[in-house]
Image (tube, helix red, strand yellow):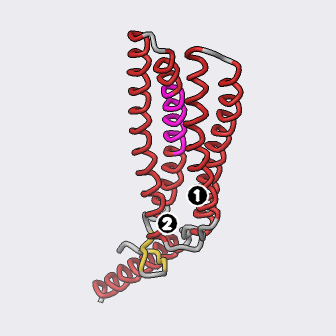
Amino acid sequence: MTLNFMKKKLLLFVLIQILFSGWILAQSPEPDLNRINENRLNMNSNGMLILGGWAVSNLVVGGIGMTQTTGNTRYFHQMNAAWNSVNLAIAGFGYYGMRGQSTDISLAETISEFHNFEKILLFNAGLDVGYMAIGAYLWERGLRKESDRLIGYGQSMILQGGFLFTFDLILYFMSRSESSKLLDTLQNVQFTGQALSVSIPL
């Protein structure tokens, strides 16, 4: 009789613990996907605005510089203007493309958007290093051949590649910080179809 009583008390204790654990986990907030995606799109849109601002400033300064300078400086401004006409187009299409995206997407789609964007940024950062290397080569070759055009173009590519490398890495780490926060909130959350549920470890 005493043994049965102890078993009942133990069973009751275990049940209370399970229920209590479930209540605690139920208090864990589910991720607000609309807010997360809104922040993600705002961050990326602001990045395009920064890129567009850099492009416009280079187009203005480069356009003026081409008409008022000579030698390698003239070619430096010429390449800056040409390079940033492409940057401006990329920034414009990127900005308006992101403004039209919906924030009402699933958890899997949200994670995929973060992942794909971060992969693109890392790939671009690798290209940026290549731009700077080509610029250094052109600069060195221009010095050997006494070519103002090669020197100016090389200096411009180093500047533009350096800016883009810094820009891409900063945007990558900002995006990575946001996606890491999202993943951290999912430690006790399971995703099934279109619903989020809290898991209760027994």
Q: What's the residue at 61%, 45% (across, down)?
A: 88
Q: How far across and how far down the image is residue 44, in percent?
A: 59, 53
Amino acid carrying label 1: it is Arg
Check whether the beta carbons of the residues at disc 2 and disc 1 lie within 8 A of each other: yes
Count neighbours of disc 1 (C-alpha within 10 A) and say few if under 14, some if 14 to 19, many if 20 or more: many
Which residue is painted at 50% across and 74% down in the image? Answer: 106
The one nearer the camera, 149 or 193, is: 149
Please identify the dominant SS of the magenta region.
Answer: helix
Residue 97 in percent (x, y) is at 59, 62
Q: Give the range drawn in magenta.
A: 157-171
Inspect the magenta stretch and tell me whether residue 168 lies in it: yes
Image location (x, y in percent) of residue 89: 59, 49
Query: Circle 1 is placed at which residue position?
Result: 40
Question: Tag 2: Cα neighbours inside 10 Å, few (<14), some, or many (≥20)?
Answer: some
Q: Nearer the viewer, residue 193 or 123?
A: 123
| Location of mark 2 (residue) | 110
